[in-house]
């Protein structure tokens, strides 16, 4: 089946730097994309989402970019803080009767050094 | 609101034993989901429900069963535990079909 995958499994940055986490997806029917943050021993926490009719969406310190031409999704975190250290997952959902079934990527480990 | 709660937090089972993982949400969400997460991997959907009395299989349903008798509860049943079911199990819920809220997880070991 089709799946969502990540280019980089680990990312290390210095505190204050900007972080970019990338994700490739293969299901052209996907119309909704989400980024989740998962801290050790906890469930995934919603960060930001974007629908396929948009190419950019901004939140607080985070921006998601969607490039449907190359089926690529990225999460940008501005002024990265030690508290941002976690595993970040992208997930995608196809429209119609998929009932919100999410397909998750493998995840990227983000480590922020003070 | 407590959000999504799961019990137990940890469990060790012997091969062939059965157990039920409990999941409750107090947000009046229609949609509920069970995922498993193996080490270093993303989440895979086991079963989902779009409302009380309605359930359907996800990507990896074999070895599991679910029921949804109320809006709040969505228990996951393992009938004959196998080592391949060693994983962390997450329950999630959503009001609309997209933004899902996750519980803290149940860490299950089958030996």
Image (spheres, rainbow, N blue to C red):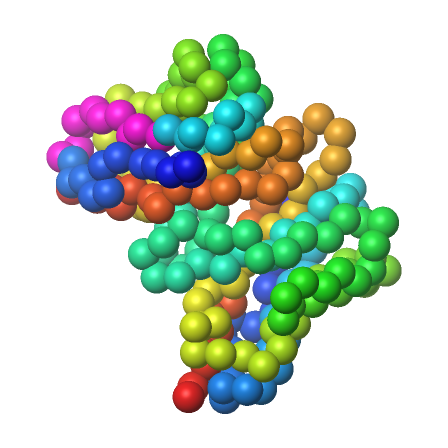
Q: Please tell me whether residue B62 is drawn above or below residue B92 in the rendered image.
A: above
x, y percent for residue B88: 33, 46
Q: Residue at x 43, y 86 (%)?
A: A113
Please state, as top left, top right, bottom left or bottom right, where the C terminus of chain B lies in the image: top left
* Magenta highlight range: B14-23
- Asked if residue B46 can be seen in this view, the reply is no
Outermost residue, front side: B1
* Residue A44 percent location from the top left of the image: 46, 52
Q: Quadrant of residue A95?
A: top right
Question: Residue A21 at x, y = what percent?
Answer: 61, 71
Whether residue B58 sits left or right of residue A64 in the image: it is left
Image side of residue B23 versus residue A108, left or right: left
Q: Please say whether residue B93 is visible from this viewpoint.
A: yes
Up the image or down, B14 lies above or below B54; here it is below
Which residue does the image show at 42% across and 37% down from the upper left? B1
Image coordinates for residue A107, horizontal then vertical, percent: 51, 61
Numbered label tally: 0
Front position in the image: B64 or B90:
B90
Name the one closer to the observer, B99 or A100. Answer: B99
* Magenta-span inclusion, residue A87: no
Q: Nearer the viewer, residue B49 or B19?
A: B49
């Amino acid at each position: 089946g089709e799946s969502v995958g990540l280019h980089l499994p680990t990312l290390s940055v210095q505190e204050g730097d900007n972080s970019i986490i990338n994700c490739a997806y293969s299901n052209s029917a996907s119309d909704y994309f989400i980024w989740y943050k998962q801290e050790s021993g906890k469930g995934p926490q919603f960060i930001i989402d974007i629908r396929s009719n948009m190419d950019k969406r901004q939140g607080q310190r985070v921006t998601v970019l969607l490039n449907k031409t190359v089926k690529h999704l990225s999460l940008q975190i501005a002024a990265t803080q030690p508290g941002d250290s976690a595993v970040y997952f992208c997930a995608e959902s196809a429209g119609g009767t998929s009932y919100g079934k999410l397909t998750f990527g493998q995840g990227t480990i983000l480590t922020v050094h003070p | 609101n407590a959000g999504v709660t799961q019990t137990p937090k940890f469990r060790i089972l012997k091969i062939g034993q059965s157990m039920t993982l409990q999941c409750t949400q107090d947000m009046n969400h229609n949609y509920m989901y069970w995922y498993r997460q193996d080490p270093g991997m993303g989440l895979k959907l086991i079963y989902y429900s779009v409302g009380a009395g309605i359930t359907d299989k996800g990507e990896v349903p074999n070895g599991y069963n679910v029921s949804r008798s109320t809006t709040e509860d969505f228990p996951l049943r393992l009938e004959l535990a196998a080592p391949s079911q060693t994983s962390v199990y997450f329950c999630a819920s959503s009001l609309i079909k997209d933004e899902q809220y996750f519980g803290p997880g149940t860490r299950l070991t089958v030996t």
